[in-house]
Image (cartoon, helix red, strand yellow):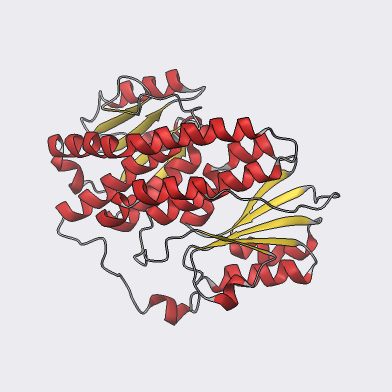
């Protein structure tokens, strides 16, 4: 897993140079629907703010079963289907269903299978087919960057200057990733007991929901314990009952609810020493950029990738190791 974490600062700048152009029709559908599972859908949610800024369409996010049930009933739409490996049978079925109903299909994947690449009207290569392990790292961030490029492609009237400004900001964030890894490793060195957490909550402003849902999945996949993501307002209405002695809580401070998040973190510290504040300024781990900064999601994501990898190693588990290898063949969800 660590080698794929490190590969991000080589691959991601290359992807930024490989822009996306789409020959969209004059009478475009009014909806963009994102379909995927796990990290794929998290990447779409993380890119949501860019589509809201640059596209004119309304956005919907479906898991594969939701789309299979509802896809044929929806208004004309763009279907953006995401599967890093291309092995998700249900995602491929969604592409087929959308095409049957004469919807424009876009497939983001790193698959090298030419037949699968032809499933959609447009194929966008993630360029990371080498990452075959379960917990996705470079595949996730590559998906995110490709989605941001796609969002920009939807803006027919945009100036090239706008795209350039965004990509300059992304490049600067990518350049900060190695240093952010060092900062996270230092925090881990000072707090080795976190690898023994029985469960974790990860809480943030709604603007960072895609980030923490992916962070939750990464830690769950590697530590193999219950990990729960909450929007900060939701956390104060029930999940706050999880605060007790020896409980473990991560808070991301940023966005409109910064003060609320920091107050909840402060309150939690009265009951447990096991809190981690990841903040724009003055956190145990400091990102040092506003959460509105284009590309800052890469830094937040990296923090969770490093935490997940190192915690697994501290418990003696190799996160590269496949778990339940017979599972997908048995349940029939991947080829």
Q: How many marks?
A: 0
Residue that extends furthest to the right in the rendered view of this protein: 27
Residue at (42, 56) in percent of width and height: 139
Which one is in front, 303 or 315? 303
Residue 118 in the image, given as x and y percentages of width and height: 64, 73
Q: Is residue 226 visible?
A: no
**The quadrant where residue 153 appears:** top right
**The quadrant where residue 54 appears:** top right
Residue at (31, 21) in percent of width and height: 266
Residue at (71, 40) in percent of width and height: 155
Q: Quadrant of the N terminus?
A: bottom left
Which one is in front, 240 or 68? 68
Q: Is residue 181 visible?
A: yes
Against 172, residue 19 (above or below) is: below
Which one is in front, 11 or 244? 11
**The quadrant where residue 299 appears:** top left
Q: Is residue 87 left or right of residue 327?
A: right
Which one is in front, 41 or 175? 175
Residue at (71, 70) in percent of width and height: 97
Against 281, residue 191 (above or below) is: below
Q: Is residue 14 left or right of residue 305?
A: right
Residue 132 in the image, given as x and y percentages of width and height: 37, 67
Against 181, residue 124 (above or below) is: below
Residue 203 in the image, given as x and y percentages of width and height: 41, 35
């Amino acid at each position: 897993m660590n080698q794929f974490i490190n590969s991000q600062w080589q691959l991601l700048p290359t992807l930024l140079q490989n822009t996306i152009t789409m020959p969209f029709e004059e009478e475009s559908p009014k909806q963009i629907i994102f379909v995927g599972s796990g990290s794929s859908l998290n990447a779409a949610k993380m890119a949501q703010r860019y589509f809201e800024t640059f596209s004119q369409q309304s956005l919907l996010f479906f898991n594969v079963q939701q789309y299979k049930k509802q896809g044929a009933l929806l208004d004309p739409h763009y279907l953006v289907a995401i599967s890093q490996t291309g092995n998700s049978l249900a995602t491929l079925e969604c592409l087929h269903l959308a095409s049957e109903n004469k919807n424009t299909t876009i497939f983001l994947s790193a698959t090298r299978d030419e037949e699968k690449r032809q499933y959609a009207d447009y194929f966008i290569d993630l360029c990371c087919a080498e990452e075959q392990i379960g917990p996705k790292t470079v595949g996730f961030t590559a998906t995110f960057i490709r989605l941001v490029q796609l969002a920009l492609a939807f803006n027919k009237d945009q100036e090239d200057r706008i795209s350039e400004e965004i990509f300059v900001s992304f490049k600067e964030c990518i350049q900060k990733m190695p240093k952010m890894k060092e900062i996270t490793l230092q925090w881990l060195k000072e707090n080795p007991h976190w690898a023994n957490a029985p469960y974790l909550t990860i809480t943030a402003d709604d603007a960072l929901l895609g980030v923490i849902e992916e962070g939750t999945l990464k830690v769950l996949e590697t530590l193999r314990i219950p990990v729960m993501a909450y929007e900060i307002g939701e956390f104060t209405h029930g999940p706050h009952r999880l605060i007790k002695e020896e409980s473990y809580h991560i808070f991301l401070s940023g966005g409109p609810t910064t003060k609320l998040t920091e107050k909840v973190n402060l309150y939690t510290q009265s009951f447990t020493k096991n809190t981690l504040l990841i903040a724009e300024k003055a956190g145990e781990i400091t990102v040092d950029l506003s959460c509105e900064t284009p590309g800052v999601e890469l830094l937040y994501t990296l923090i969770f990738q490093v935490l997940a990898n190192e915690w697994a190693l501290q418990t003696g588990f190799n996160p590269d190791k496949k778990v339940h290898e017979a599972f997908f063949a048995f349940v029939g969800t991947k080829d």
